[in-house]
Amino acid sequence: MAQRVVLHVGTMKSGTSFLQNVLGENKALLAERGVLFPGRRWRRQVRAVKELIAHGGPGQPPMPADGPWQQLVDEIRAWPGTAVVSMEYLAPRDEGQIQRIRKAFPQSRVEAVVTCRDLGRNVPAMWLESVQNGGTTAWPDFVAALGDRKDESAVASRFWRHQDVPTIAARWAKGLQRGAVSLVTVPPPGAPDDLLWRRFAEVLGISAEGTRLDVRSNPSIDLPSALLLLELNRHLRPDGRGELPPFYDRQVKHQLAKRGLSLRAGGGQRLGYDDPWARAQGEEQVTRLRKGRHRVVGDLDELRPRPVPGLQPADLPTEDVLAAAIDALGIALDRWARVRAGQDEGDQE
């Protein structure tokens, strides 16, 4: 049975993809240092957490006896040291689900790590992410909705479910043993590239030295690409609520956006953000987190929003969006040609 089960629960857009890739690319080195990153691939953890969320609770179907979650639990139970699971979907779990997780490891100390980044960077990052997931809400409407937690469009509820760091940390602290929650703050721009990993490794109780950090990141798309995708989403979902086409997740989100437009040569104009409301919310979060007395690796002052340089959509020349559209067409044609060539060689993708 693992002595410690460390759950990296998010939050979204707080360096989670980077840390997940570092953990996955250094599995063997971590194992030598007593840390298990379970699952042959990180996707196994994603499937396990999704199954945990959808099964076993009130009104839900029973948890499969040999499904992805139980397989993950069995692998962790067989490990003698520390096991770490990293999945952002864990952040908004309620107290009942937290208890179910804790009971799955009765002889282990279960801990939660909340990585967190300032709202100044996370508000635009969450909008950009929403557009890559089929969202049809314009940037000004997105920003305006965040102050209304009863917003009928659910923009605010989705945002705060993953970005209300004090509430997330307090809920996990209530469900776990005393002192079992650690906050890891994301360093500000200009900090050393390895600093976030060093902070996370400190929580794990291992040396950060010798770890391969040249892993695939999750770069953000630029503002022209975001506006292009916004119009595409509105074309695919004219009412803003319909189902996305089956191809969207793989072909638009991953192939076109994350592996294509995010890598545009030189990048385009970035989305800027500087809002007194965000600064006030950031101050409130810092105050609440200090009162929570959680372990902090980093500095809570880093959660105070600073201006993010860039343009607003209304100030962006139409030519920039057209350039993004031309790049997108080239990416799609290249992808189509490679798939066709693969099919000719027997690839049934």
Image (spheres, rainbow, N blue to C red):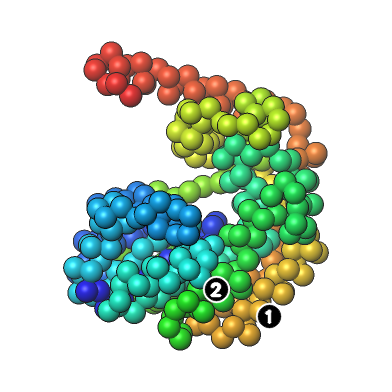
Q: Is 196 on the left-hand or right-hand side of 105?
A: right
Give the total number of marks visible in the rendering.
2
Check residue 91 in the rendering and tell me which mark sits there, or answer none: none
User: Within 10 Å of the Cα at label 2, are there few (<14), some (14-19), or many (20+) other Cα atoms?
Assistant: some
Image: 288 above or below 242 = below
Image: 312 above or below 157 = above
Q: Is 289 on the left-hand or right-hand side of 278?
A: left
Coordinates of residue 156 in the picture (x, y in percent): 70, 54
The residue depicted at 40 percent of the width and 51 percent of the height is 61
Residue 190 seen in the current view: no
User: Within 10 Å of the Cα at label 1, are there few (<14), some (14-19), or many (20+) other Cα atoms?
Assistant: some
Coordinates of residue 126 in the picture (x, y in percent): 62, 51
Coordinates of residue 13 in the picture (x, y in percent): 55, 56
Coordinates of residue 76 in the picture (x, y in percent): 25, 66
In this view, the residue in front, 183 or 7, is: 7
Report which residue position mark 2 lands on. Answer: 171
Report which residue position mark 1 lands on. Answer: 287
Q: Quadrant of residue 100?
A: bottom left
In this view, the residue in front, 93 or 140, is: 93
Q: Amino acid at mark 1?
A: Thr
Quarter of the picture holding the C terminus: top left
Image: 84 above or below 106 = above
The residue depicted at 27 percent of the width and 21 percent of the height is 347
Q: Amino acid at mark 2?
A: Arg
The local secondary structure at tag 2 comes to helix
